């Protein structure tokens, strides 16, 4: 595989004896960089922190004013057990929660669905009902914590349950802070947890935009995610290009739905992956900020400065974690966290070193949080804004990565945008993933403890296990919930959901009423599926 003008997003496979070095995006790394490597337009393209084009950060003082939000992705088994983990993290200095949902919840299925067997509570918490959401946040004042929900196809339903619990606590919707991932396009491209076809899914996304503008103004209505592209095998260039291309699709869909760009764009957020190559990652974040500000100003005519600022969350790379010599992952996570901070992230989740094997134990979660705190207070990365600015290497990387990402976005545009380019993006990511594998297989790319510096003994740390009894208990709770409600009222509410799905008005007020009257998450999603249909991939 060679890097050509037609294909400049993937490192070539050249073997371990080739003296050249490449980033995963095929950018050849020189032995040394000089001022001649800097782009001639650098001064105006760099700007000042807090000023357009935001290359150097979206705030003038960055972390001198306020540190990033320190999150830990948490949730497993039952709502009660997840609540205990949330409290634990907050007590140890976490400043935000990232809520992990199990696979059935992500697919809009109740725990008693036959398709949920063996998966309830395994990869996150099972949330079937308002009772579950109430238990998950018992004793956690929702006006004092920012909550990120990793949920996509049923995002509107989970947000509404959260809003209802806040209301029960006496917390008005205008005080709620957090994010729903709500990015279903990346599910079609890279992850696979979808329910409905693209068009009704985009309707739900833009309905959530409009609903939050009116009722939940501090809520980030979407986290446009490149993270999962990188987990699937994308290069850094592909991650930036496809993430921003999807962002373009969501903005256009909202405008087509009648929203003014500056009414919703300030609440858009992004979600990127953090990998081990510190210099490329810093360049990636800087390039993405610059590109998005220009897209919003020049393509969509946004005038509110908040609409131009790319605000993003970073999670350290799950795919970089290795089951072999798992304590090496502590070093990997620290490097990735350092890169995210030097790149100007607004929010950060650091993975537990044991996550290649299971959900993180309390020890691993605490150590991951402590990693962020060490970076914040001991590394010096938070002491000055954009600490790598002016580096010959990083500025050259930033410019090259931006150029290649723009070329890839142009290809998506030529295909009619992200909704029409799903097959193209999937194919690009698959080709990149193959390249990763071949470079690892041949030893061109070294993974410490896996294809070099290997030890004979198998190191297996203490791991967290979710047993079958937890699933059985959740199904029993759901049965009691469904027995203890007005069944006729629930059926009327579900029919109202179907009627609303057939129409064009905003769906969320109708969904909210159904959930308030004790319809389950799976029932509400199922009612919409009866009208919208179910997405069936063609490839």
Image: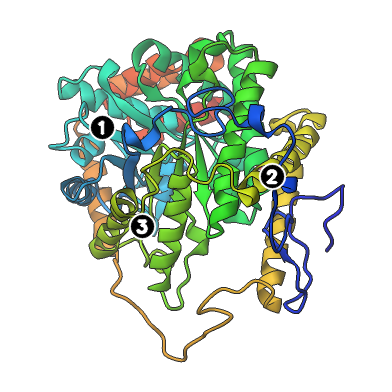
Disc 1 packing (10 Å; few <14; some 14–19; many ≥20):
many
Mark sitting on residue 401: 2
Q: Is residue 499 visible?
A: no
Q: Residue at x 65, y 52 (%)?
A: 234
Q: Position of residue 43 (x, y in %)?
A: 64, 31
Q: Earlier in the sequence, mark 2 or mark 3?
A: 3
Disc 3 packing (10 Å; few <14; some 14–19; many ≥20):
many
SS at mark 2 in the image: helix
Q: Position of residue 268 (x, y in %)?
A: 49, 25
Judge depth for marks 2 and 1 and give the one in front.
2
Q: Residue at x 36, y 50 (%)?
A: 380
Q: Position of residue 534 (x, y in %)?
A: 59, 36
Count numbered badges in the picture. Answer: 3
Q: Residue at x 52, y 49 (%)?
A: 273
Q: Position of residue 312 (x, y in %)?
A: 47, 36
Q: Are marks 2 and 3 in contact (CB under 8 Å)?
A: no
Above or below: residue 307 compared with residue 448? above
Mark sitting on residue 372: none
Q: Quadrant of the N terminus?
A: bottom right
* Residue at image mark 3: 122
* Residue at image mark 1: 130
Q: Residue at x 67, y 64 (%)?
A: 436
Q: Residue furthest bottom?
A: 456
* Front-lying residue, 213 or 60: 60
State the CA–CA distance, disc 2 to disc 3. Answer: 38 Å
Q: Is residue 374 left or right of residue 189?
A: left
Q: Earlier in the sequence, mark 2 or mark 1?
A: 1
Q: Earlier in the sequence, mark 3 or mark 1?
A: 3
* Front-lying residue, 506 or 82: 82
Q: Residue furthest right?
A: 5
Judge depth for marks 2 and 3 and give the one in front.
2
């Amino acid at each position: 595989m060679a890097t050509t003008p037609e294909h400049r997003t993937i490192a070539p496979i050249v073997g371990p004896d080739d003296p050249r070095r490449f980033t995963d995006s095929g950018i050849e790394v020189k032995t040394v960089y000089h001022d001649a490597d800097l782009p001639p337009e650098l001064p105006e393209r760099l700007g000042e922190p807090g000023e357009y084009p935001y290359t150097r950060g979206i705030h003038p003082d960055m972390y001198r004013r306020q540190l990033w939000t320190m999150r830990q992705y948490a949730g497993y088994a039952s709502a009660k057990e997840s609540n205990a983990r949330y409290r634990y993290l907050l007590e140890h200095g976490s400043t935000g929660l990232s809520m992990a949902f199990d696979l059935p919840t992500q697919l809009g299925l109740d725990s008693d669905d036959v398709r949920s067997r063996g998966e309830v509570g395994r990869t996150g918490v099972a949330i079937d009902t308002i009772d579950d959401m109430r238990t998950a946040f018992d004793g956690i004042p929702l006006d004092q914590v920012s909550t990120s929900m990793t949920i996509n196809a049923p995002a509107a339903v989970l947000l509404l349950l959260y809003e209802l619990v806040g209301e029960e606590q006496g917390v008005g919707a205008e005080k709620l802070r957090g994010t729903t991932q709500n990015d279903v396009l990346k599910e079609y491209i890279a992850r696979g947890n979808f329910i409905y076809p693209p068009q009704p899914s985009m309707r739900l996304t833009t309905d959530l935009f409009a609903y939050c503008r009116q009722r939940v103004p501090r809520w980030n209505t979407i986290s446009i995610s490149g993270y999962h592209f990188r987990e699937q095998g994308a290069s850094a260039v592909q991650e930036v290009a496809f993430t921003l291309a999807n962002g373009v699709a969501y903005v256009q869909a909202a405008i087509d739905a009648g929203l003014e760009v500056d009414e919703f764009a300030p609440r858009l957020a992004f979600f990127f992956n953090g990998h081990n190559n510190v210099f490329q990652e810093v360049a990636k974040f800087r390039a993405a900020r610059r590109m998005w500000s220009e897209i919003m100003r020049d393509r969509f005519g946004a005038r509110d400065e908040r609409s131009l600022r790319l605000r993003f969350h970073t999670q350290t790379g799950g795919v970089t974690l290795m089951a072999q010599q798992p304590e090496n992952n502590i070093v990997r996570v620290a490097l990735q966290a350092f890169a995210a901070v030097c790149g100007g992230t607004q929010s950060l989740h650091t993975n537990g070193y044991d996550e290649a094997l299971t959900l993180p134990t309390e020890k691993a979660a605490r150590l991951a949080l402590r990693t962020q705190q060490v970076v914040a207070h001991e590394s010096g990365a938070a002491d000055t804004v954009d600490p790598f600015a002016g580096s010959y290497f990083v500025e050259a990387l930033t410019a090259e990565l931006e150029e290649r990402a723009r070329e890839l976005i142009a290809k998506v545009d030529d295909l009619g945008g992200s909704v029409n380019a799903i097959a193209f993006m999937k194919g690009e990511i698959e080709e990149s993933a193959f390249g990763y594998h071949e470079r690892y297989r041949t030893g061109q790319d070294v993974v410490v403890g896996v294809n070099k510096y290997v030890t004979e003994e198998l190191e297996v740390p203490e791991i967290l296990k979710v047993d079958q009894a937890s699933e059985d208990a959740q199904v029993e709770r759901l049965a009691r919930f469904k027995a203890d409600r007005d069944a006729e009222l629930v059926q009327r509410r579900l029919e109202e959901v179907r009627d609303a799905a057939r129409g064009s008005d905003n769906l969320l007020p109708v969904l909210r009423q159904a959930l308030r009257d004790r319809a389950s998450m799976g029932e509400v999603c199922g009612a919409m599926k009866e009208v919208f249909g179910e997405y069936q991939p063609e490839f």
